[in-house]
């Protein structure tokens, strides 16, 4: 069952939150994991608010995409990001696992572009934030099919290095996937379940 929500989550079910920049494939990843219809936008930033899916023992929350959104003002972009942060802080201890979706095919390019401006890329900033509010953060390195095979290990190593820089005491849990090609979806599912098990949370009814 899918529900659009801007309100507090009722009941005591723990949460699995899916977060990430606009157009990294959050909704597509959730659809690949659950087989359930979720809203998949045709343009960046089309999902403006979180969508909640009841998976039995847990609630899955598809958060609004943040960062650059074509056709949106800077004020709207900042408002969306702030709303996502406030919602996650509000949920706090209910979050059993946080899944950060990253477009691994563009990650290096974006890091270098933001670095030239002396700014921290949104992906890295949000990884640090999620690590502060949850002890179970999984990075789904999406669009691995768009990376040349000879470059895959290099791009994954670079991703891990950058996340280690912001949270040096925790080894990043990175699962390379392609939501559109359904590559490593089972591995992502198993990784999420293992993190839930450590928290004493039952497996989702995917």
Image: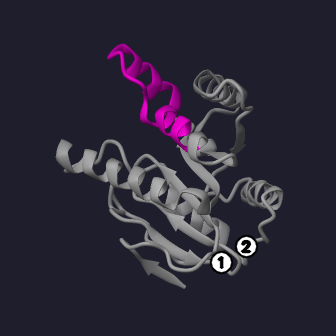
User: Which of the 4 quarters of the picture holds residue 58?
Assistant: bottom right
Magenta stretch: dominant SS?
helix
Whichever of labels 2 and 1 marks the residue nearer the N terminus, that label is: 1
- Seen from the viewer's position, the closer of residues 143 and 132 is 132
Can residue 177 be spotted in the picture? yes
Q: Is residue 75 left or right of residue 151?
A: left
Q: Residue at x 56, y 48 (%)?
A: 101
Where's residue 24, x and y in %?
48, 49
Q: Is residue 186 left or right of residue 42?
A: right
Position of residue 167 relative to residue 173, above or below, is above
In the picture of the structure, the residue carrying the numbered disc 1 is 55
Q: Residue at x 63, y 32 (%)?
A: 148
Position of residue 143 relative to residue 181, above or below, is above
Specify the segment rendered in magenta. Answer: 106-130
How many circles with numbers are drawn on the protein? 2
In the picture of the structure, the residue carrying the numbered disc 2 is 204
Quadrant of the image containing the N terminus: bottom right
Sort mark 2 into few (<14), some (14-19) or many (20+) by Cα contacts within 10 Å.
some
Where's residue 153, x and y in %?
72, 28
Where's residue 16, x and y in %?
62, 62
Is label 1 in a helix, a strand or a loop?
A: loop
Was residue 126 drawn as part of the magenta stretch in this picture? yes
Q: Residue at x 41, y 17 (%)?
A: 115
Separation (CA) of disc 2 from disc 1: 5 Å
Sort mark 1 into few (<14), some (14-19) or many (20+) by Cα contacts within 10 Å.
some
Quadrant of the image containing the C terminus: bottom right
Q: Is residue 111 left or right of residue 161?
A: left
Is label 2 in a helix, a strand or a loop?
A: loop
Can residue 65 be spotted in the picture? no
């Amino acid at each position: 069952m899918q529900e659009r929500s801007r309100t507090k989550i009722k009941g005591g079910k723990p949460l699995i939150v899916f977060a990430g920049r606009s157009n990294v494939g959050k909704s597509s990843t959730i659809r690949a994991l659950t087989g359930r219809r979720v809203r998949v936008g045709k343009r960046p930033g089309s999902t403006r608010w979180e969508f909640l899916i009841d998976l039995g023992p847990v609630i899955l929350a598809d958060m609004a995409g943040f960062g650059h959104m074509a056709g949106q003002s800077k004020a709207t972009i900042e408002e969306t990001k702030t709303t996502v942060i406030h919602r996650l802080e509000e949920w706090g201890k209910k979050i059993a696992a946080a899944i950060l979706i990253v477009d691994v095919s563009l990650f290096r390019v974006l890091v270098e572009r933001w670095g030239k401006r002396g700014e921290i890329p949104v992906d890295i900033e949000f990884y640090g934030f999620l690590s502060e509010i949850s002890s179970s953060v999984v990075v789904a390195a999406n669009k691995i099919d768009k990376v040349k095979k000879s470059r895959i290990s290099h791009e994954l190593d670079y991703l891990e290095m950058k996340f280690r820089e912001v949270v040096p005491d925790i080894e990043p849990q990175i699962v390379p996937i392609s939501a559109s090609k359904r590559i490593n979806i089972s591995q992502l599912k198993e990784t999420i379940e293992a993190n839930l098990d450590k928290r004493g949370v039952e497996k989702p009814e995917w």
